[in-house]
Image (cartoon, rainbow, N blue to C red):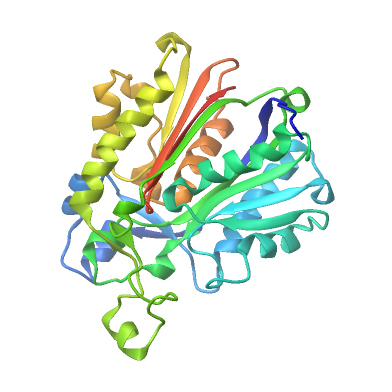
Amino acid sequence: MTSNIPVGIASLGHYVPELVRDNDWFSQHIETSDEWIRQRTGIVERRWLAEGQTTSDIFVEAGKLALERAGVKPEEVDLIVCGTISGDYLACPATACIVQDRLGCKNAWAFDLNAACTGFLYSMSVGSQFIATGMHKNVLVLGGEGLSRLLDLNDRNSVVIFADGGGAALLQPHDTCQQGLIEDMTLGADGSGYHYIIRPKGGAKEPVTPEIIAEGTHMIRMKGREVYRFAVSRMTELMAWAMEGQKLEELGWVFPHQMNRRILETATGKLNIPKEKVYINIQRFGNTSAGTVPICLGEAWEKGLLESNKLQLLAAFGAGLTWGAARIRW
């Protein structure tokens, strides 16, 4: 197929667990404080999965909302793509298959995609290809995490940052949905920085052993300084790409990956993007990795902030290293 059908976003949905972990909770377990966390990250509180909840629960709730809002029946969905690094099971089965079954999308095929914090943008790019070629009419793309299950409570660099939650977007031909036109996307990767954000052990390279569990190296580890430098430069480049040739007065919102408030303010400030145009909710939800961008986008849609014909910019970077950005005309 060689068609190039314009792709739109028919609807959005997002979900975050009800369990709140504020900064004071962490000060009871590790050497930190509310002030320390706020100053370095901008986070005040975040949501974690409650006992018995799973990552698929997040996707099912977000996906169900997106389908209901679009008036699309589960059996009309052709494909489900889940961007996540914290699926219900290690390696297999794909969480997307669990979501497919639970949503009742019996005619859809499904798979997971691992691009860490860039997962939603990677998934949206992949999913949109099946609309653009005319192969499918309804593609459900999701991004989200249950990262609290992969955190070492003794590792201050990561445990206070990461959180749980996610969102969904239903993609359709733009002629069908008449909104959310995906004008352009850019994606990238640099594997030389793979060790900056990593679960060092527990995979096929070094399978789980009692010793690995005891030392906690099967949990996420992050090199904060290296990630900070990469994030500032990459986010600035992504924003520059997104704004190239665009008029500032046409800008609706910038929806950046919510990793660190200082990174967001530094990157957008370098390009003179007005602060009031940058959507930030990290103070309430922390860093939900692949979930941050769709949660922001979903909140803005619910609040009626996505004005017709305005440009919405999405940008993210994450482990891998990976990055991506999109221009969407609402």
Which residue is pictured at 33% across the width and 57% down the height? 194
Task: Report the front residue among 135 and 318.
Answer: 135
On the question of residue 18 being in view, the answer is no
Q: Is 219 situated above or below 327?
A: below
Could you tell me residue 322's position as x and y percent? 40, 46
Work out whether residue 306 can be spotted: yes
Tell which residue pokes out farthest to the front in this image: 2
Question: Residue at (62%, 50%) from the top-left corner?
Answer: 62
Task: Classify residue 247 by image quadrant.
Answer: top left
Q: Is residue 44 left or right of residue 90?
A: left
The quadrant in which residue 22 appears is bottom left
Residue 188, position in %: x, y? 43, 40
Q: Residue at x 74, y 31 (%)?
A: 2
Out of 217 and 310, give the one closest to the viewer.
217
Query: Considering only vertical position in the picture, is 227 above or below 5?
Result: below
Where does the image place residue 21, in percent across and percent down from the top left?
Answer: 36, 60
313 above or below 39? above
Q: Position of residue 34 (x, y in %)?
A: 21, 54
Observer-nearest residue: 212 or 273? 212
Give the left or right position of residue 91, taking residue 100 as reference. left
Question: Compared to 268, does 244 lie above or below?
Answer: above
- When asked about the image quadrant of residue 183, the answer is top right
Instruction: Quadrant for the N terminus, please.
Output: top right
**Quadrant where the image shows the C terminus:** top right
